Amino acid sequence: MEDADLGDEYGWKQVHGDVFRAPSMPLLFSSCIGAGYHVFTVAVITIVLAIVGEFYTERGSLLSAAIFVYAASSPVNGYAGGSMYARFGGRHWIRQMALGAFLLPSLVCGVAFLINFIAIYYHASRAIPFTVMLAVTAICLFVILPLTLVGTVLGRNMSGQGDYPCRVNAVPRPIPDKKWFVQPWVIVLMGGVLPFGSIFIEMYFIFTSFWAYKIYYVYGFMLLVTIILAIVTVCVTIVCSYFLLNAEDYRWRWTSFMAGASTALYVYLYSVYYFFFKTKMYGLFQTVFYFGYMGIFSAALGLMCGTIGYVGTAKFVRKIYSTVKID
């Protein structure tokens, strides 16, 4: 028997029996969240290291530090993704662990191999030596994968139990028709506008340091911008998800993740503008080189922002539904 207030209400309270239902494609979703946690951890640690040390004095030292931090912090990926997949009731945890571990590295390696193939064809100096590619593959197989496995095992055993304030109904509730502006795809596209606006100026300086070979040394400001980005992303995705839940649509997990991740779409569109109006690049190799690496950057940013948005929204959803009294 439901509380009297609950029966008289419309909107988000009506979906209390489905709001904590596992999302569609839980294996992919939990892998994306794990990878997003990983990218955020690497970004924060690398920026702090850049503030403490003088990485801008030697080109390439920051990239080396980021690769080391990425490999060393792999248990974060496994713990976050593995525990979430266990809470969703997933059974193929080895597949989830492997997908989470190789989600971003496979994209990086795929783009790098394509660019390398074109570089060799054009006899460009940007070609990556075979030994370097072999070393990266070895790091993925013998460092990142085992550490991700450790994190996954810990996550499944330590926080793999779902403790939700509302019981999930056996039969999913039908999702009613709603107006176009609360459709998930509209919410997702609108969700990235404000977060992109908060980092728009900083993107120009980052792009300039990378593509115009200017020295970037204001890492303290970058840390501040990262914090602002996280706060804005959480606020926007919470509002977006609240609109969705109020329309009696309980598919907030993917929507909150994609709404945060859509920031990367606007960053990539800005990179297209930057390529044509701010750089003097031309030819097949330079074009593929630019858009390939901007694709990697945008994908990593999307995973990070999507995870930040989802985590903030999950805390909000848990909080509001813990106040709903059900007998």
Image: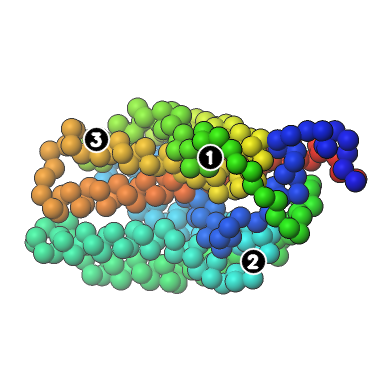
Looking at the image, tell me whether mark 1 or mark 2 is earlier in sequence order: 2
Real-space Cα separation, disc 3 to disc 1, in angstroms: 29 Å
Is 189 placed left or right of 215 in the picture? right
Q: Among all residues in the image, which is located at the extreme front?
A: 177
Q: Earlier in the sequence, mark 3 or mark 1?
A: 1
Residue 314: quadrant of the picture: top right
Q: Which mark is residue 183?
A: 1
Q: Is residue 206 above or below residue 96?
A: above
Q: Secondary structure at mark 1?
A: loop
Q: Quadrant of the C terminus?
A: top right
Q: Is residue 234 left or right of 116 when viewed as pictured? A: right
Amino acid type, callout 2:
Gly
Report the front residue among 142 and 208: 208
Mark earlier in primary sequence (2, 3): 2
**Which residue is depicted at the point 22% across and 47% down?**
290
Q: Amino acid at mark 1?
A: Gln
Q: At which x and y percent is residue 260?
A: 50, 40
Q: Compared with residue 38, is residue 132 higher up or lower down, i.e. above or below? A: below
Residue 38 lies, in percent from the top left, at 50, 53
- The type of residue carrying mark 3 is Tyr
Say which residue appears at 39% left-offset and 56% top-offset.
67
Between disc 3 and disc 1, the foreground one is 1
Colouring used for the render: rainbow
Q: Say which residue appears at 79% left-offset and 52% top-offset.
A: 167
Front-lying residue, 326 or 30: 326
